[in-house]
Image (spheres, coloured by chain):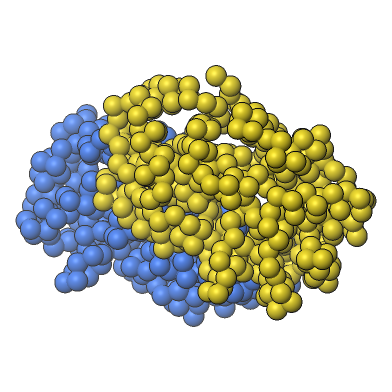
Chain colours: A blue, B yellow
Amino acid sequence: MKKIKTANYDICFGIEGYAVLGQYLNEKKYSKIIILTDSNCNEHCLPHFLSNLPTHILFEIIEIEPGEEFKNLEIFTGILQTMTELEADRKSVMITVGGGVVSDLGGFVASVYMRGIDCINIPTTLLAMVDASVGGKTGVDLEGIKNCVGTFSMPRMVIVDTSYLETLNGRQIRAGYAEMLKHGLIYDAAYYDYLKDISNIDFEDLSLLIFHSVYIKNEIVSQDPEESGLRKILNFGHTVGHAIESYFLTQNNKNPLLHGEAVAVGMVIEAYISTQLSSFSKDDYEDIKKTIHNIYEKVQIQADDIEQILSWIKFDKKNYNGNIYSVLLSNKGKAEYDFLISKDLVIRGFKEYLK
Amino acid sequence: MKKIKTANYDICFGIEGYAVLGQYLNEKKYSKIIILTDSNCNEHCLPHFLSNLPTHILFEIIEIEPGEEFKNLEIFTGILQTMTELEADRKSVMITVGGGVVSDLGGFVASVYMRGIDCINIPTTLLAMVDASVGGKTGVDLEGIKNCVGTFSMPRMVIVDTSYLETLNGRQIRAGYAEMLKHGLIYDAAYYDYLKDISNIDFEDLSLLIFHSVYIKNEIVSQDPEESGLRKILNFGHTVGHAIESYFLTQNNKNPLLHGEAVAVGMVIEAYISTQLSSFSKDDYEDIKKTIHNIYEKVQIQADDIEQILSWIKFDKKNYNGNIYSVLLSNKGKAEYDFLISKDLVIRGFKEYLK
């Protein structure tokens, strides 16, 4: 079985991971397993998970509605209340089975229930496999502000079982793929070049590429787990991307974007800003823009929208003293952080994206 | 200036602490100070605090209602929302000025806002000085279950300024005193013997005794910050005490007890159980009972109440697999943890307390 060892936990790849998990659960003598999942995963993923899990420990299932709009403090409170009703104690373990919303929420709940119980992540989406379930960032949105409330709290184990990807549609796969492109852009130019033409990638490739993305993410996180410096580079595309996502999430007349779709737009705009404030070449920017436009439908953004999206940027966690700080590319495969950027440049970035 | 250094932060005693704090704030270049306080402290303590704080950093005040009934996830959510409105960022610092409710709530908010900002505690009650503001336990109650949701998150500094004690009434002083008696009972027999006759203690003594209590608490916490073992002994009196507190808090026809008042009852009952399950002597138990009855009015508890109080005990964080585990005394000044106790013994303890 392939495995990536982090400082705190193992990320197991493939169906052999369940045997490791079963052994771990029994050794730790957990009093109870609380499985957090959403209604989609409960139907499509949980049967596979439960039929593969070798343990006799009692489990309970908490199901939430799917979607980023439910990643909030109200649902967080509801899950905590349900856990007391289920008499979860400090020796209970949370297992999240789902995408990024489930692992972010479940990880946050686990990190504060009785001041912290163990959490294990079973990501079922590409995005959660390559990003959300690894690295210990947990949290919820607050009135649309992305991940405004949460903790750094490492899981005890992650199982990356790509058979869950068969339950996803193309849109969901492409959304997760954006984070993989990001890994290439900030850390590994050859990886990015390999990923550029998504039509070349088959399912078998994807499993190997997921491993490589998790490897890169872990390399970065292990050097700076609580994001005092280097880890910020994983935020490339997110200063603008989160603002776009928050805006679409809170507008009644817009369909919410998936996280990766918003980050894809953010990467184009931040790559453009990189040509203005860093040494990033115009050619590489054009290449990124073309790559993103080939994979993702262009998001319709009007002048009015841009103004309102900008008002969300102030909530980015990398900001301070009222200034916007962003991650920029100096070269393909190399990112730097703490660049002060202006709203004007972001507006120009949007115009470049829409051209 | 007297100071206790912990592994992570300094506890400064006396008015000289403010100069240290001012220097610290300026060195850290915080973008903004968020002061959390309650309406009582805003009136009686904040003028003293602000007039002594040498800093030019902008501050904002968030005021909550006083009382344990407001230490919940609704107020927690409200404070977080207010912080986004005040545009607090990751380089902002939370300063709590108040009693245990304020430092528990503020510490929890600080530990999760943008995945964690710094927090500094200025305790204004005896209970907060000797217990709540030191040691990094933060949290809120959930539907009456004490501290069911929270984090272990160390403050960056604590200032113990006993001049705030002049704002307290005798009942509040006695409530805090219960935690000091506990420090003696679990760790230092001579200290307990010194504290027994509260009529001997004057204000000057109290300052020295607070220092000693904080010293004891820090000795214990520093060996086991996240309560995997030894730190549990600080919970002496709390298995039963928290259940009593939760019961009185959630009954409309009862006046809530102060935390220390409930713990005082809990200590008598758990000392009685110690005579049954551990080597604790009957004479020492009688001595504790007499001491508590001398200081605190006997709490009126009927047979009906006991039954309902027992139903709260199951939520104690030291429990697992549906069993109740408690801290017991083996000798005066010596506690041990993880004793399995029965509901019957707790009932007998209540009867002994009420005799």
Nearer the observer, B116 or B239:
B239
Residue that lies at the very extreme toward the front in this rendered image: B199
- Please state which of residues A77 and B165 is positioned toward the viewer in this rendering: B165
Residue B53 visible to an observer of this rendering: yes
Question: How many numbered marks appear?
Answer: 0
Query: Residue B159: x, y in percent?
Result: 50, 31
Residue B5, position in %: x, y?
60, 26
- In this rendering, the answer to whether B24 lies above or below B61 is above
Q: Position of residue B104 (x, y in %)?
A: 51, 49
Using the rendered image of the protein, determine whether residue A20 is visible from the camera's viewpoint: no
Residue at the top extreme of this rendering: B1
Q: Residue at x 88, y 48 (%)?
A: B284
**Quadrant into which the C terminus of chain B falls:** bottom right
Dividing the picture into quadrants, the one containing residue B313 is: bottom right
Q: Is residue B4 above or below residue A335?
A: above
Q: Is residue B340 left or right of residue A311?
A: right
Residue A234, image x and y in percent?
37, 43
From what the image shows, is residue B248 above or below residue A221?
below
Q: Residue at x 39, y 33 (%)?
A: B48
The N terminus of chain B lies in quadrant: top right
Q: Name the foreground residue: B40 vs B233.
A: B40
The residue that appears at 21% across and 60% down in the rendered structure is A247
Residue name at image x 70 percent, y 50 percent:
B295
Say if B319 sits above or below B55 in the image: below
Describe residue A339's horizontal placement relative to residue B156 as left or right. Answer: left
Q: Give the quadrant of residue B187.
A: top right
